[in-house]
Image (cartoon, rainbow, N blue to C red):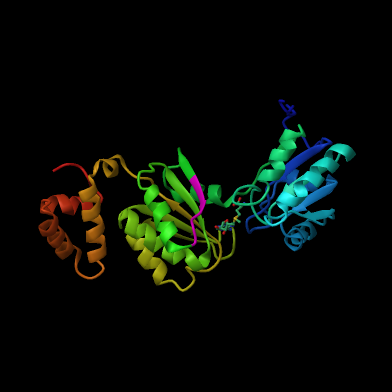
Amino acid sequence: MTATVSSERISLSIERPALYVVATPIGNLADISYRAVTLMAQMDMLLVEDTRMTQRLLQHYSLTARLVALHEHNEADIVGGIISRVVSEGLAVALLSDAGTPLIADPGFRLVRAAREKEIPVFSVPGPCAAIAALSIAGLPSDRFAFEGFLPPRKTARVRRLRLLLAEQRTMIFYEAPHRVLATIDDMHAVYGSEREVVVARELTKLHETLYCGPLGTVSAAMRCDENAARGEIVIVLSGAKDEDLTATGDEHKARQMVDILSHQMPKADAIKLVAEWTGLKRNRVYRLAHGDQSEN
Ligand code: SAM
């Protein structure tokens, strides 16, 4: 079934039955669309992750609404009942996350899927998304990108996942918890080398918005010196592998990693000399690998 979308340039009309997927602010309460505010006031029900969080938003805009909790722990159980009511009572309901766009590292997939299966029209009311906000200011290639969401919390699984992404050439976007961000940046440093470019976006749209930008080695060191680096909400934007990275042999990858590791203990020039002797690679080749230039010779 194809949903009919209004061709008017500005449409604030509501369909019934329908499901509206509404993006909400990721920090700055002013970051919500006019359409989202207008629409929330007219909904029969708002399906929300945390009723207290949504109440705060509603109060800010002097709105009242019927709130029903839908979160990762109850979504599977309640979706069937909600969909039945939407159909039988002809309801217009909206799905909201605590922050940002529903379904993006947030609940809602089962609901949207179930609505589509019952041919209930599903409409997007677009707005903030931390991943897109970070990408849009990172200054890293944005023509193609991969959203990776949260990495595994345990180090072994996280490093395995990062290794699987070694050949990914698109810019990658990760969400990370503040208490893990330094460990994750260190793991990225170990896997991708010190020269791979990264942007760590902290507290976007909020009072303490901070960006750490540069090669992984520099960003890792800078974040370790900042006592606030591991606070607040964080998006990591990592540049993809370059063509040259993919043509480096396994030995060359290892040589680069060895230089990175040894450079923590000795001057980089000494590390390059040692690794060249150890691997039998030419010293200027190791130098180029260590500095991100992987061209032959
Ligand atoms: N659905 C949301 C979206 O559209 O961005 C994401 C929800 S996910 C559960 C929460 C994660 O998003 C946080 O742990 C953090 O990685 C990221 N995030 C949310 N708000 C942020 C902000 N203001 N600044 C930086 N990262 C943010």
Q: Nearer the viewer, residue 29 or 150?
A: 150
Report if residue 149 lies within the magenta region.
yes
Residue shown at 43% from the left, 71% from the top? 226
Percent across and percent down for residue 161 are: 42, 52
Q: Quadrant of the N terminus?
A: top right
In the displayed image of the protein, which residue is found farthest to the front?
77
- Count the marks: 0
Residue shown at 79% from the left, 37% from the top? 18
Residue shown at 72% from the left, 55% from the top? 74
Question: Would residue 162 appear left or right of 30 to someone viewing this image?
Answer: left
Which corner quadrant of the image does residue 85 belong to?
A: top right
Say if 39 sits above or below 26 in the image.
Answer: above
Percent across and percent down for residue 199 are: 43, 55
Q: Nearer the viewer, residue 22 or 214?
A: 22
Question: Would residue 265 appear left or right of 90 to someone viewing this image?
Answer: left
Which corner quadrant of the image does residue 110 belong to?
A: top right
Q: Which region of the structure is painted magenta?
A: 147-153
Percent across and percent down for residue 250 are: 24, 48
